[in-house]
Image (cartoon, rainbow, N blue to C red):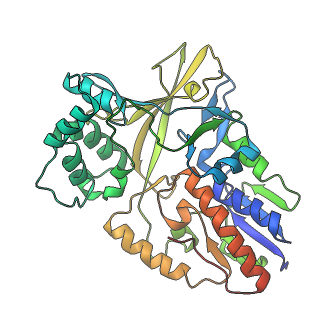
Amino acid sequence: MSTSRILIVGAGFSGAVAARELAAIQDRKILVIDEREHMGGNCHTKRDPTSGIMLHRYGPHIFHTSREDVWAYVNRFAEFGPFINRVKARIKRGVFSLPINLGTINQFFGRNFSSEEARAFIGTLGDSRIDEPRNFEEYALKFVGRELYETFFYGYTQKQWGCEPRELPTSVIKRLPIRFTEDDNYYSDRFQGIPREGYTALIKRVLDHPDIEVKLGTAWQAGMAGEFEHVIFTGPLDQYYGHHLGRLGYRTVFWERSDHLGDYQGHALMNYPEVGIPFIRKIEHKHFAPWEEHEKTVVYTEFSKESGAADIPFYPKSLGPDKILQARYLEQARSETKVSFLGRLATYRYLDMHQVISEALDFTPRLAEAIRRGQPRPVLPAL
């Protein structure tokens, strides 16, 4: 048995960044395992052999951050091409820009508002009876009114999450800005782009270090922990404990592929918020790489459903029972001495790529220092 090796479970961004940083500052050999046959987790990208298009195999991933150190970090391992995420929504009345902005408001209401006029107008639509919004629906009704809520938010949210929006916390809708300018960039972060060679190539470079070994197609087994000095687990928190308290609720997504000549929808992402349409959006992958030219195009039609035992978990539902169960699992996790939990699955939170990287960069030096000093090791990032 080796006492100078660290095991990292998961070769996504959390595991890869943690491995690289530990290898740089710690005199330890590091083994990274992943049950899938590829690196990158749900960020995995692969060049399509029939069209030549770089496919985002588990849904669209656009990198965005305002942290200069995080942007500098990913640019160490990949060249990023410029990409602005301009999402559209198709309804019976036409195609509209999201997030809701000045252009959306004027188009939807048939007006020619200035920025301040639009702000004042939307203010008259909100439900003034709602003081402090308690959930997704109340937040939308207070700040955009019923017509915009029911057109752009209600159906999409119900299909994506499989529940009524009033069951979801306000944090879900707060991720979607409302703007009174013509800015249709989905994100407001300073830096935004997509790696020209894809995310999997980026993560391969992160893991390319003489002290890091990667084994794919290797599932985590509880008995592995005894073979290593420390374990960083980035898989689902309830999976680590064998689901013995129950399963945390997740939504998963799946896609139907179609191939076409030319251009299909003119944009990477087209939302379909109407309730009667069973899918939630269409993804045209070649538009994620505007620096490339392709005669063909590949479209993924995305559906959402409850995550079963055999499904890949994507979005933590974090409803009332889930929060209670999460707290019970976290209580068990905090008692660990040789295991740390890192990343969105291991902490059961909705995190973007830049947040995952930020946490790994902040957490790993603390862990390395505790190992070096023989002190109690941090189990969780600051939640």
* Image quadrant where residue 157 sits: top left
> In this rendering, does residue 233 appear at all?
no
* In the image: residue 358, left or right of residue 252: right
**Is residue 356 depicted above or below 82 in this figure?**
below
* Image quadrant where residue 224 sits: bottom right
Q: Report the residue that reaches farthest toward the right.
A: 210
**Is residue 131 depicted above or below 294 in this figure?**
below
Foreground pick, 315 / 223: 315
> In this rendering, does residue 70 appear at all?
yes
Q: Report the residue that reaches farthest toward the left.
A: 129
Residue 327 position in % (x across, y down): 43, 76
* In the image: residue 145, left or right of residue 202: left
Residue 300 position in % (x across, y down): 50, 31
Foreground pick, 68 / 196: 68
* In the image: residue 59, left or right of residue 138: right
Q: How many marks?
A: 0
* Residue visible at 66% across and 48% down in the picture: 40
Residue 242 position in % (x across, y down): 54, 72
Q: Quadrant of the N terminus?
A: bottom right
* Image quadrant where residue 296 sits: top right
* In the image: residue 291, left or right of residue 255: right
Residue 14 position in % (x across, y down): 64, 59
